[in-house]
Image (cartoon, helix red, strand yellow):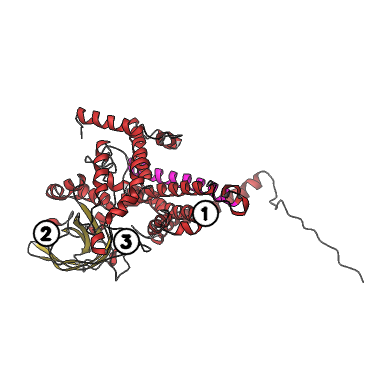
């Protein structure tokens, strides 16, 4: 998508204005791992620097304002639209920071970056509560927009994708259910029955992230349309349901370790004879698994990217704490205590290692697609949340009571990080998938090692060597005499 020269000029001037801010020792583009640098364009490097300054200087300071502007009370908090959000969205568009998540080799609707390039940007977005939404790169809209872009008809794209890309509306993805083990999507029970030119939906969903926001206008819903199909993977379908369709009730919002995430929220929703036009079906009846696999792969890697940023932010807070001259337990600053410095070192190693895992997964997706990167995505999905939780926990420990309170963002970050081990498939599912695929090599590995042992025996005969343990001692003590 070409951008008029006048708009490009405005964006460049805005970018330069932003970069005049507080000096930094090393810009984001200079911190790109060397192994990934050749895969990052000059344009992406410049954008990455703009993203860094936008997040550090405008979004992070605004995070607390967003929480203040949401207000008090359940109904007020889930009807709010903090004014600072629109200010930041306008600023992001001026800077050209909009829809960066749609990879250029798969979609024409995005900003023209690769998954790897966006991965580097998403790390910075993950340091702020509001940055992802401000740049129209927030979940679940990102995954939902990919569904519309990849599988939607032109009519569906015109009705829902265009306003989502413009940031005019938000969306929710409804798959998880309260009464079944939803980690196995074949268990999904929401009933879809074809009746004339409509589908009638009955059932319950929860952890419907984004459903609390009054700007949420469209649900992507997975249900069971053909329960008697011989293939358990063809019983499900995905359908687009306008949020204000009669028969839908949002009963309550679910908290995450006490945080309500208003106005976004995580809804518990029921469908009671909800009538949806058959033209709202996504891709085709019985193709629900195809749709959700196409959606969840990129979504998992996006979560991992942002989690890297959360870990970096936690380490920054950790370093600030142990260098606070007011904190001198046992007569020393915290950084003078060896255990703290060891935790800093381990955090640095773990973050840098995890980043390479994420970038590798992004690169595999770029070279092929998400389906070809199942192993790499699963590795990132398991490794990165565990790493982030460990790093955040170390920072919390350094802050003591302040670390578990509302006086720092660390407790909230830990709560969100902990959910990452569950959302888009729990650790157990990914570990089982990884182990199952890895174990396919088991028979071949057994045969290879046994062949190598036989080869050793043959080589020993050829060279006239008697095989003997190099530590063989054979020390025998004579029997004692009476």
In the displayed structure, does residue 58 sit left or right of residue 468?
A: left
Q: Position of residue 411 (x, y in %)?
A: 42, 57
Judged from the image, the secondary structure of the residue bearing numbered disc 3 is: loop
Q: Nearer the viewer, mark 2 or mark 3?
A: 3
Quadrant containing the C terminus is bottom right
- Mark-to-mark CA distance, 1 and 3: 26 Å
The span picked out in magenta is 339-368
The disc, 2 or 1, on the residue closer to the chain's N-terminal end is 2
Q: Position of residue 46 (x, y in %)?
A: 34, 32
Q: Give the residue at mark 1.
A: 398
- Mark-to-mark CA distance, 2 and 3: 34 Å
Q: Give the residue at mark 2.
A: 278
Query: How dense is the environment of label 1, judged by Cα within 10 Å: few (below 14), some, or many (20 and up)?
Result: some
Any part of residue 362 in sight = no
354 falls in the magenta region = yes
Q: Give the residue at mark 3.
A: 260
């Amino acid at each position: 998508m070409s951008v008029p020269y006048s708009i490009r000029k405005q964006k460049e001037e805005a970018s330069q204005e932003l970069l005049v801010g507080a000096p930094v020792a090393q810009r984001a583009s200079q911190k790109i791992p060397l192994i990934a640098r050749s895969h990052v364009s000059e344009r992406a490097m410049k954008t990455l620097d703009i993203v860094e300054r936008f997040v550090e200087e405008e979004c992070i300071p605004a995070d607390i304002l967003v929480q203040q502007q949401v207000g008090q009370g359940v109904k007020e908090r889930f009807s709010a639209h903090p004014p600072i959000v629109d200010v930041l969205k306008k600023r992001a568009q001026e800077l050209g920071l909009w829809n960066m998540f749609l990879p250029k080799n798969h979609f024409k609707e995005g900003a023209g970056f690769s998954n790897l390039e966006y991965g580097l940007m998403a790390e910075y977005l993950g340091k702020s509560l509001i940055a992802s939404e401000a740049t129209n790169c927030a979940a679940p809209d990102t995954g939902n927009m990919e569904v519309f872009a990849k599988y939607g008809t032109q009519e569906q794209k015109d009705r829902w994708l265009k306003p989502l890309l413009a940031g005019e509306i938000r969306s929710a993805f409804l798959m998880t259910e309260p009464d079944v083990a939803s980690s196995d999507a074949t268990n999904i029970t929401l009933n879809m029955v074809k009746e004339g030119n409509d589908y009638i939906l009955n059932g319950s969903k929860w952890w419907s992230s984004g459903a609390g926001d009054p700007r949420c206008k469209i649900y992507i819903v997975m249900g069971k349309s053909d329960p008697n199909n011989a293939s358990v993977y063809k019983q499900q379908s995905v359908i687009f349901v306008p949020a204000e369709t009669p028969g839908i009730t949002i009963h309550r919002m679910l908290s995450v370790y006490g945080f309500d995430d208003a106005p976004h929220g995580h809804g518990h929703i029921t469908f009671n004879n909800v009538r949806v036009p058959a033209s709202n079906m996504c891709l085709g009846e019985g193709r629900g698994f195809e749709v959700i696999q196409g959606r969840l792969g990129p979504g998992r890697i996006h979560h991992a990217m942002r989690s890297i940023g959360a870990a970096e932010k936690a380490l920054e807070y950790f370093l600030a704490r142990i260098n606070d001259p007011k904190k001198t337990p046992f007569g020393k600053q915290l950084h003078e205590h060896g255990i703290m410095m060891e935790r800093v070192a381990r955090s640095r190693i773990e973050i840098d290692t995890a980043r390479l895992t994420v970038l590798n997964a992004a690169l595999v997706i770029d070279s092929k697609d998400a389906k070809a990167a199942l192993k790499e995505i699963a590795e990132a999905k398991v490794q990165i949340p565990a790493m982030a939780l460990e790093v955040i926990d170390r920072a919390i420990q350094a802050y003591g009571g302040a670390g578990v309170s509302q006086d720092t963002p660390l407790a909230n970050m830990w709560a969100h990080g902990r959910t990452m081990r569950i959302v888009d498939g729990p650790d157990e599912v990914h570990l089982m998938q990884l182990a199952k695929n890895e174990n396919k090599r088991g028979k071949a590995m057994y045969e290879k090692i046994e062949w190598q042992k036989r080869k050793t025996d043959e080589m020993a005969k050829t060279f006239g060597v008697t095989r003997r343990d190099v530590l063989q001692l054979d020390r025998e003590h004579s029997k004692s005499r009476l």
